[in-house]
Image (cartoon, rainbow, N blue to C red):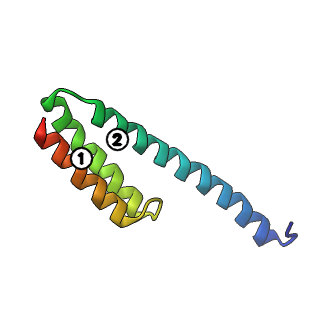
Amino acid sequence: MANHKSALKRIRRNEAARVRNKYQHKTMRNALRKLRAEEDKKSAETMLPTVISMLDKLAKRNIIHANKASNLKSKLTKQVAAL
């Protein structure tokens, strides 16, 4: 355990960021699950832009990989179009 003031601050900041990232990632996964389970095309089309926005934000902040976000967006768009 570090004793420097800056190191202690960094430990606190890292924990706060970890919790925030975990929350955002879990929220995105729940939104994905909800969108995949959707049967109604109209409601799926209204949900799609918000889920894509979530994916883009997570990719921008390096919470998920950019290619993973692209793959998920592609698959979701295909699924909604096929409804």
Q: Earlier in the sequence, mark 2 or mark 1?
A: 2
How many numbered dots are placed on residues in this image?
2
Viewer-proximal residue among 45 and 7: 45
Residue 13 higher or lower than 22, as above or below:
below
Classify mark 1: residues with Cα within 10 Å, few (<14), some (14-19) or many (20+).
some
Q: Point out the image quarter for the N terminus.
A: bottom right
Q: Label 1 is placed on what type of residue?
A: Leu
- Which of the labelled discs sits on residue 32, or is there none? 2
Residue 6 higher or lower than 77, as above or below:
below
Marks 1 and 2: in contact by CB < 8 Å? yes
Say which residue appears at 20% left-offset and 34% top-offset.
Answer: 44
Q: Residue 66's quadrant in the figure?
A: bottom left
Say which residue appears at 41% left-offset and 37% top-offset.
Answer: 30
- Which of the labelled discs sits on residue 76, or is there none? 1
Q: Point out the image quarter for the C terminus.
A: top left
Q: Secondary structure at mark 1?
A: helix
Viewer-proximal residue among 3 and 66: 66
Viewer-proximal residue among 29 and 61: 29
